[in-house]
Amino acid sequence: MRGPEPRPEITSLPLYVPGATRGTGEDPVIKLSSNESALGPSPEALRAYREYAEKLRLYPDTGCHELRHALAERHGLETTQIVCGNGSDQVVHALTLLYAGHGDEVVFSENGFLRFKLGAISCGATPVSAKEVKHTTSVDALLASVTDRTKVVLLANPNNPTGTYVPTGELERLWAGLPPTVLLVIDSAYAEFVESADYSSGEALVGRSENVVMTRTFSKAYGLAGVRVGWAYGSERVIETFNRARLPFPVSGAAQAAGVAALQDEAHLRAVIGHNTKARDWVAEQMRDLGMPPLPSATNFNTCRVSEPGSGLARTVMEFLTSRNILVRPLDAYGLDNYLRITVGLDSENEKLIDGFSAFVGRLS
């Protein structure tokens, strides 16, 4: 006898596979597969997290009032237009579920974050992938993909896994070309790492529109991936809609406390960004010298072309590194089977990474 059957689209969903956490060698694991912070969270965030232990018997603040106030103060936003969630992934997923359903379409770039496609399928909508140009989101392609069935456009900016970004002018053009009935969600998870003057995280667009939402995370630059804190900034109408449907207590009290403290430690954030820029560029230069050039990156990772498409060499390289307990991310799921995504680590980790790549190249000569 068979039990209850889920909706057909759910059974067709591929499982999301996160970055590897275990190696096959004997050395300490160097985990460069999940774009986590090399320097980790602020000491103040750690202190706040530990101190919250005395309150663990209590439910957390379901409205995340203190955290939303800290975010509003840090970014110059309105508290009433901010909502917090269990990581920005959860926030983006919830927005997709709220605004798209059966018969609708959700549009995103062909190498956009993999969860975009899975979220569209899970709510019964049709995922629509728009071609990129040189591994960068094409606004023309996104707009050409919009139909009268489109309900949501999802844009990761900068994008994961390519590391490239859409400049402010193109972002404005995308918004201007969309019907006002289409929700534009700008996932700016890596915004803190972008140092180019022509970049905008989307805050300005939200401030003058009813159909734009910007999402952010504490998992990357703030180093709080383990406690899952994300947030969104949108029109009051969108935020009200979100709050009507969300589950209670979306962010643990300890995570909220850590988030507030992290926002207040600006010196630590500057140190994280400074290290990231220097180390990312060093790894990029070394990889170019090894004949495995990276795509331009405005994030905390380098996505490197290590072979020709279809050769299988990228996975061989990854397995070789894994045997040394150096973990990087394969991109087969994105159709980028000749690329590897490499998180920026500590200097010592980056040096061992390059030693590993050099050893592999030496075996080929």
Image (spheres, grey):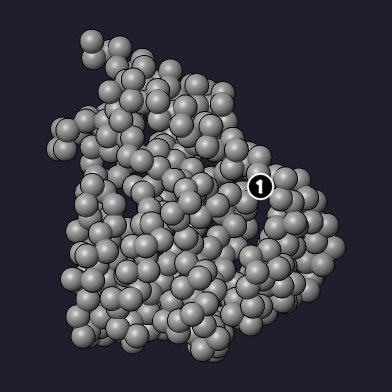
Answer above or below: position of 286 versus 279.
above
Q: Which x, y percent locates residue 132?
A: 22, 55
The answer to which of 299 and 117 lies nearer the viewer is 299
Q: Is residue 291 above or below residue 248?
A: above
Relative to residue 166, is residue 164 depicted above or below? above
Residue 71: x and y in percent read 66, 67
Left or right: where does residue 304 sit relative to residue 219?
left
Q: Is residue 227 left or right of residue 211?
A: right
Label 1: few (<14), some (14–19) or many (≥20) C-alpha neighbours in 10 Å: many
State how many labels appear: 1
> Which is nearer the eye, 69 or 226?
69
The residue tagged with tag 1: helix, strand or loop? helix
Q: Quadrant of the N terminus?
A: bottom left
Asked if residue 85 can be seen in this view, the reply is no
Q: Does residue 264 appear anywhere in the picture?
A: yes
Above or below for 277 versus 115: above
Where is residue 258? Give x, y as percent.
Answer: 72, 58
- Tell me where residue 81 appears, x and y as whole percent: 59, 80
Quarter of the image for residue 63 reads: bottom right
Mark 1, residue position: 269
Residue 96 horizontal side relative to residue 313, left or right = right
Residue drawn at (52%, 31%) of the image: 279
Q: Which residue does the image show at 45% across and 56% down from the upper left? A: 199
Position of the C terminus by quadrant: top left
Q: Please, which residue is most extreme toward the left here?
A: 310
Q: Residue at x 59, y 35 (%)?
A: 275
Identified at 22% across, 76% down, the residue is: 146
The amino acid marked with disc number 1 is Leu
